[in-house]
Amino acid sequence: MQVSGFNFIAGQRSALGDTLVYSVDAHTGERLPGAFHQATLAEVDTAVAAASAAFPLYRNLPAVRRAEFLEAIADELDGLGEDFIALTCQETALPSARIQGERGRTSGQMRLFAQVLRRGDFYGARIDQALPARTPMPRPDLRQYRIGVGPVAVFGASNFPLAFSTAGGDTAAALAAGCPVVFKAHSGHMATAERVAEALIRAAERTGMPAGVFNMIFGAGVGEALVKHPGIQAVGFTGSLKGGRALCDMAAARPQPIPVFAEMSSINPVLVLPQALASRGAQMAKELTASVVQGCGQFCTNPGLVLGIRSPAFSAFIEQLTGHMAEQAPQTMLNPGTLNSYGKGLQALLAHPGIKHLSGLAQAGNQAQPQLFEADVSLLLEQDELLQEEVFGPCTVVVQVADEAELLRAVAALRGQLTATLLADNDDLATFGQLFGALEVKVGRVLLNGYPTGVEVCDAMVHGGPYPATSDARGTSVGTLAIDRFLRPVCYQNVPDALLPDALKNANPLGIQRLVDGKSSTAALN
C-alpha cells in the first residue's frame, strides 16, 4: 500500500524536512515500504497557526454543524476497506477482529459525541436573571455558558491505533468542544494514522469545515515544540508515566501554563473476597487469566494486582491461576520497544527478594510470555515502587493479606488507579461494604463482578483517576464527559439579548436545557 508520508497542515500535505522515519511490520520488525517526513519546527509552527486561524471560525459554527462533521468522520472511518484493516494489523500485530471492533468503537464515539452536540447540554447554560429590587444590593443579569479552550495538541497512543489515536477519544472530544486539533502521530502505526487522517480531511471538506480544523505531524522530537507552542491551549496524551510527566512539566513551565490531560500508569487492583471465592473460585481464576492476557496485556486497564485474604481457598485460587497462566501462549506485542519495556519490567520483578515467580516461561525471542508473580504484602504496605508501577503486558502480581483490616490498609497504600474490581457475593458486600468508600478515593471506576479490560463509550463512563493514573482526576478520556476537558466557562453580565450567544438568549432558540434561577428549564424567558 502506497503512503505519501507527508504531514497534514491546513488541509494540505507538507514535507519540508529531510529527516525520514519508517513504519515496521510488528510481527517481523522489518521496515515497511514508504517513508514519513518528520515535521520541521517551521511545519509545527504552521500547523499550530492553521489551527489557531481555524479556531474562531470553527467554534462559532452552530453545534449541529460540528455534529455533522463528526458524523461525516464516522462514515469515512466505517468506509475504510479490508486493505486498511490488513495494514493496521501489520503495523500493530493486533488481530483483524480487534481492529474491526476498534474501528466501530471509534466511529461510534464520533456519533455519540455528535448526539451530545445536538442535545446542547455541553453548553452548561446557566442564567441568573437580574433582581433590581433586591436589597441592600441589586443583582445584575448573569449568564454563563462554555466554549472551547482553543487549539489542542493530541498525542496518539500505541495500544489502540484507532480508538486512542488519530480519530480517537481526545481528538473527538476536542473537535466536539469546538477546538481544532494538531495531532502527533504515534511512531508505531504511522501508515494507519495517515489513512485515518485522510478520512478526517475528507470529512472536513465534505462538511465545509475550516482548513486548519485538523492537522497531523510525524516524527520524533516534535512533541516538545508542539506542547511549548504558545498557540496550543491544552494537551491530550495517553502513554507512559515518564512521557506524560514530561509533557506536564513542559506545559507547566510555559509563560502561559496550560492543562495536560494525560492518562499514564495504572495497575488496576482486583480484590477477591471470601464468599465469592468459596462459591466460584475456579471460574474466577479462569476469567481473571483471560483478562490478564487479553490483547497481550496491552490495555491501560489490565489487572496488574490481585488481592485476597489468606486462606486455604485463596491458596487454591492462586494454584488455579498459576496453572491457567502456564497454559497461555506467548503473543506478539505492538512493537519491539513495548516488548523491551516488558522484559525490563519482568527482570525487576524477578530480581526483587520479596517477590516470587509463580508461572511463565523465561522471556526470550520476539514474543511476550505471560507471567504470574506473588509479592509479600509488606511491599505494598510500605509502598515499594516496584509494586506500584505498571508492567505493561500479560503479567499480574498476587498479594495475600492477613484479614479485612490489612486489606483496607493495602488499598490505602495504593496510588491512584483507573479501575478497581471487587469479585464478591452478596454476603461479601455486607461484610466488606466499607471497601467501596476506600476505593472510590483511589480510582476512577469501581467494578463489581466484572473485569476492567473493557471500557464502554457512553455518557456515564469514567476512564480516569487520581495521579499517576491520570494527570487530572477531574476528567475522563472515554465517554461524553471527555468533552468537558476542552471547555471553559464564560459569563456575560448585563449584556443585551441581541448580543448574547444563542445558548443564553431569552427565547432559547436552541431549545436546550438551561439552569434558570436555580431551576432546570427549556422554556423561553420573558
Image (cartoon, rainbow, N blue to C red):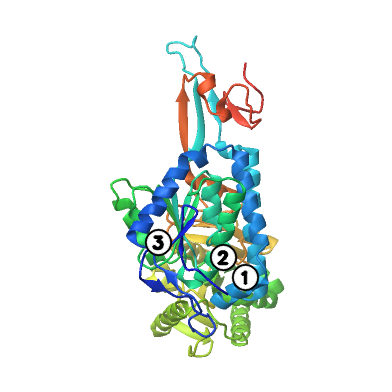
Query: In the structure shown, which secondary structural element does the residue marked by tag 3 occupy?
Result: helix
Report which residue position mark 2 lands on: 195
Residue in view at x 63 percent, y 67 percent: 451
Whichever of callouts 2 and 1 sits on the residue coming sooner in the sequence is 1
Whichever of callouts 3 and 1 sits on the residue coming sooner in the sequence is 1
Nearer-the-camera pick, 305 or 495: 495
Q: Position of residue 501 (x, y in %)?
A: 53, 28
Residue neighbourhood size for the residue with mark 2, other residues' Cα within 10 Å, grouped as few (<14), some (14–19), many (≥20): some
Query: In the structure shown, which secondary structural element does the residue marked by tag 2 occupy?
Result: helix
Residue neighbourhood size for the residue with mark 1, other residues' Cα within 10 Å, grouped as few (<14), some (14–19), many (≥20): some
Q: Position of residue 273 (x, y in %)?
A: 61, 67
Nearer-the-camera pick, 511 or 71: 71
The N terminus appears in which quarter of the rendering?
bottom right
Q: Nearer the viewer, mark 3 or mark 2?
A: 2
Whichever of callouts 3 and 2 sits on the residue coming sooner in the sequence is 2
> Are the residues tagged 2 and 1 within 8 Å (C-beta)?
yes
Query: In the structure shown, which secondary structural element does the residue marked by tag 1 occupy?
Result: helix
Whether 406 is drawn above or below 141: the answer is below
Q: Quadrant of residue 121?
A: top right
> Are the residues tagged 3 and 1 within 8 Å (C-beta)?
no
Q: Amino acid at mark 1?
A: Phe
> Are the residues tagged 3 and 2 within 8 Å (C-beta)?
no
Residue in view at x 56 percent, y 58 percent: 167
Q: Position of residue 300 (x, y in %)?
A: 52, 66
Q: Quadrant of residue 240?
A: bottom left
